[in-house]
Image: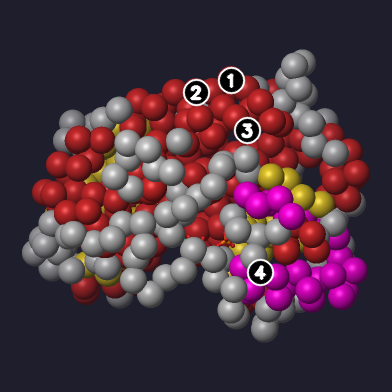
Amino acid sequence: GKGAYPHYMLKEIDEQPAVMRRLLDEYLDADGQLNISPELLQAMNAADRLYIVAAGTSYHAGLIGKTLFESLVQKPVEVHVASEFGYHMPLLSEKPFFIFLTQSGETADSRQVLVQTNALHYPSLTITNSQGSTLSREADYTLLLHAGPEIAVASTKAYTAQIAVELFLAVALGRHNQLVLAEQFDVHHELGLVATGMEALLSEKEQIETLTTDYLQTTRNAFYIGRGEDYALSLEAALKLKEISYIQAEGFAAGELKHGTIALIEAGTPVIAFLVDEKTIAHTRGNLQEVTARGAQALTIVSERFAQEGDQVILPSVNPLLTPLLGVIPGQLIAYYASLHRGYDVDQPRNLAKSVTVE
Ligand code: F6R
C-alpha cells in the first residue's frame, strides 16, 4: 500500500535513496567486488557493439547507459526505441550484444525485438524489475532492478535503478578488461554519495513545489533543455511532465532550439535548463539567454560546483557520470506537483496503462 502517502508516485520518488542502497547490497560483495556472472561479462566482452533497446522512460535510461558503457568500457553503444527497431532494423555490427531495459519485462514493442534477435541467435540480457517476466525468460541473462513494485503509471524509481544497474555492469565489464577508469571507480562510495544527495533534494520538496507554482501553474507548454547527458535528462523530465500534467512539454537539445523551435518561445514560456554536464554548461547558459531575450521564463537546475547567483535548484555534487541520478529528481517532483495542482489523477493518468502489451 501507499501508507501515509497521498500517491504512489510520491512514495516511489521518495524510495529512490533506499533503492540505491539496496542495489549496493545486492550487487556488491563484502570485499567490494561486483557479483555479476563471469559468463555474462564474457558474452558482452566478445561483442563488438552493445545495442540497448527499450521504450519510454526505459529508453531514456538507456541513453544514460550509453555514456556509462562508452566511458567505462570503451565499447560503442547504440540505443534504440523498440518500436522503431522492430520494423527498421539497422545494419548490425558483426558481433552485437543486446540489452533490453524494461521495468515490467512485458512491453510488447521490446519483446518483439527480442524475438527477432533470438531468431538470429544474438546474445541478450534483460534488465528488469520483474523476475520471471516474459523478457527475462526469453533473454540469455537477467539482471534485476530490486526497486520493489512500481505502481504509479509514471516511472520513477525504475529509471534510477536502471541507471545504477547499467553502472554496475559497465564497471564490472571495464574491470574485466582492466580499464583504469573502471578499476578506480569506487561504486560503493560514489553511489552512496548519490543516495545521500537524493535525500538532501527530497528533503526540500517545498522549494520545488513553489517553483512549480511560479513557473507552471497556468502554462500550456514548457521546454526542458540541455546538452549531452543533460539532453537525455531533458527528454525524461519532459515525458514525466506531459504524461501526468498534460502540459505539452518538449525535451530539447539546447543548441538545436535556435534551428527552428525557438519560434515557439513567447512571453512567459517556461524553459527549464539542466546545467549538470560540465563540458556544455556555458553553451546552455548562452541558449538560456537567447530564450529569455524572447520573453521565456528560465528556471535552472544546476550542479553545486557550477552554481551562480540566480540559479534556482542546486544539485549536490557527485561523480560526473552519476549526475543524472540526481538531476532527474527535481524533474520528477515538478511533474508531480504540476499534476497535483491541476487536480489530475497523478497515479493513473488518462489514456495510459502501466504496462504496454500491444505493439
Ligand atoms: C513513463 C513510462 C513508460 C514506460 C514504457 C516502458 O513514465 O512509464 O514510458 O517506461 O512504457 O515500460 P517498461 O520499462 O516496463 O518496458
Q: Are marks 2 and 1 in contact (CB under 8 Å)?
A: yes
Apparent side of residue 272 relative to residue 14 in the rendered image (left or right): left
Q: Is mark 1 on a helix, strand or loop?
A: helix
Q: Which residue is drawn at 29% across and 45% down?
A: 6
Q: Are marks 3 and 4 in contact (CB under 8 Å)?
A: no
The earlier-in-sequence mark between 1 and 4 is 4
Apparent side of residue 8 relative to residue 30 in the rendered image (left or right): left
Q: Compare residues 333 and 340 and report the one nearer the observer.
A: 340
Residue 126 sits inside the magenta stretch: yes
Q: Tell me the kind of residue under disc 3.
A: Leu
Q: Tell me the kind of residue under disc 1.
A: His
Apparent side of residue 146 relative to residue 247 in the rendered image (left or right): right
Q: Tell me the kind of residue under disc 2.
A: Leu
Q: Which residue is drawn at 31% across and 57% down?
A: 346
Quadrant containing the N terminus in the rendered view: top left
Residue 110 circle label:
4
Q: Mark 1 points at which residue?
A: 189
Q: Residue at x 35, y 43 (%)?
A: 10
Q: Do the residues labelled 4 and 2 touch (CB within 8 Å)?
A: no
Apparent side of residue 24 relative to residue 96 in the rendered image (left or right): left
The earlier-in-sequence mark between 4 and 2 is 4
Q: Tell me the kind of residue under disc 4.
A: Ser
Residue 193 circle label:
2
Decide if residue 161 is in sight here. Answer: yes
Q: CA–CA distance between discs 3 and 4?
A: 24 Å
Is 358 drawn above or below residue 141 in the view shown?
below
Is 322 drawn above or below residue 215 in the view shown?
above
Q: Is mark 4 on a helix, strand or loop?
A: helix
Q: CA–CA distance between discs 4 and 2?
A: 33 Å
The stretch of residues the image draws in magenta is 107-132
Q: Is mark 3 on a helix, strand or loop?
A: helix
Residue 329, by quadrant, is top left
